[in-house]
Amino acid sequence: MSLFGIKLFGSKKTPPTPAEAIQRLRDVEEMLMKKSDFLEKKVEAELQTAKKNGTKNKRVALMALKRKKRYEKQLTQIDGTLSTIEFQREALENASTNSEVLKVMGTAAKALKGAHDNMDIDQVHNLMDDVAEQQEIANEISEAISNPTGLGEDFDEDDLLSELNELEEEELNRQLLDVNVDVPQDLPSVPTSEPEAAAASSSRPRPVAAKADDDDDMRELEMWAS
């Protein structure tokens, strides 16, 4: 193609990457957000102008309200544009994420295939069979080494338990005998003599006999008086 043809139809440009497109959309979003803030301030200013001149100069107030309506219309358009850009940016971000995931998965699949190229499934099965066989042999060897058979230690467990019970019973009887021996024998003896206080009280004259003598004297006195 001639140089004239290239200039006429234009050169074919390389499309932007998803990351570049996402960055451009963010730049546009930022610009529209700034413009939206500016228009909101203009709307508030025109509203104040309309309130200030509502009773003084109606023409100025009406013009301020018209400008306010135009600014509000622009704000509505900007809000719609921002919603569209946000939707497109999110779609690009999801597509970019999916693309990266697919690339990583493709790379992992190739690496896994390369790792399996040097492996044969039959060889793997044979190797695992050899490992299991050697493990079984090792277990048999360990069991043979640890088995006390032939070393004079083949005892009947029931006989051992019976002997252990007899030993426990003997120990219990010995403990009971030790308890009886430990009982103290030097208890206080029973007194054989009468206490001094009781002897003193028995030596005193009994008031019962004295009272009987008084009664006899009274009867004799009554007989003499009569």
Image (cartoon, grey):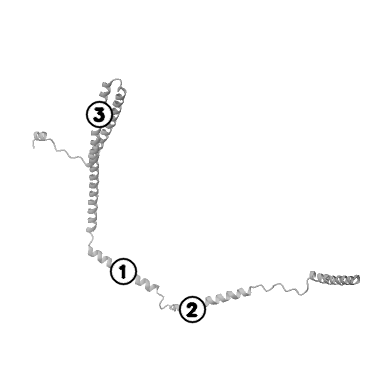
Identify residue type, mark 1. Gln
Q: CA distance from mark 1 to mark 3?
A: 90 Å
The percent position of residue 37, horizontal first and vertical second, equals 29, 31
> Is residue 226 left or right of 71 when viewed as pictured?
right
Along the line of sight, the residue nearer the viewer: 29 or 122: 29
| Cβ–Cβ under 8 Å for marks 2 and 1 | no
- Above or below residue 173? Residue 128 is above
The percent position of residue 1, horizontal first and vertical second, equals 8, 37
Q: Residue at horizontal 32%, vertical 68%?
A: 135
Identify residue type, mark 3. Lys
Q: CA distance from mark 2 to mark 1?
A: 43 Å
What is the quadrant of residue 85 in the picture?
A: top left
Which residue, given by chain and number where applicable, does mark 3 sit on?
Answer: 69
> Is residue 81 left or right of 48 when viewed as pictured?
left
The percent position of residue 8, horizontal first and vertical second, equals 10, 34
Identify residue type, mark 2. Ser
Give residue 97's mark.
none
Along the line of sight, the residue nearer the viewer: 194 or 99: 194
Which residue, given by chain and number where applicable, does mark 2 sit on?
Answer: 162
Q: Residue at horizontal 32%, vertical 70%?
A: 136
What is the quadrant of residue 93 in the picture?
A: top left
Q: Earlier in the sequence, mark 1 or mark 3?
A: 3
Tell us which disc is closer to us: 3 or 2.
3
The percent position of residue 28, horizontal first and vertical second, equals 24, 35
Give residue 134's mark.
1
- Label tally: 3
Q: Earlier in the sequence, mark 3 or mark 2?
A: 3
Q: Secondary structure at mark 2?
A: helix
Residue located farthest toward the top when viewing the structure as drawn: 56
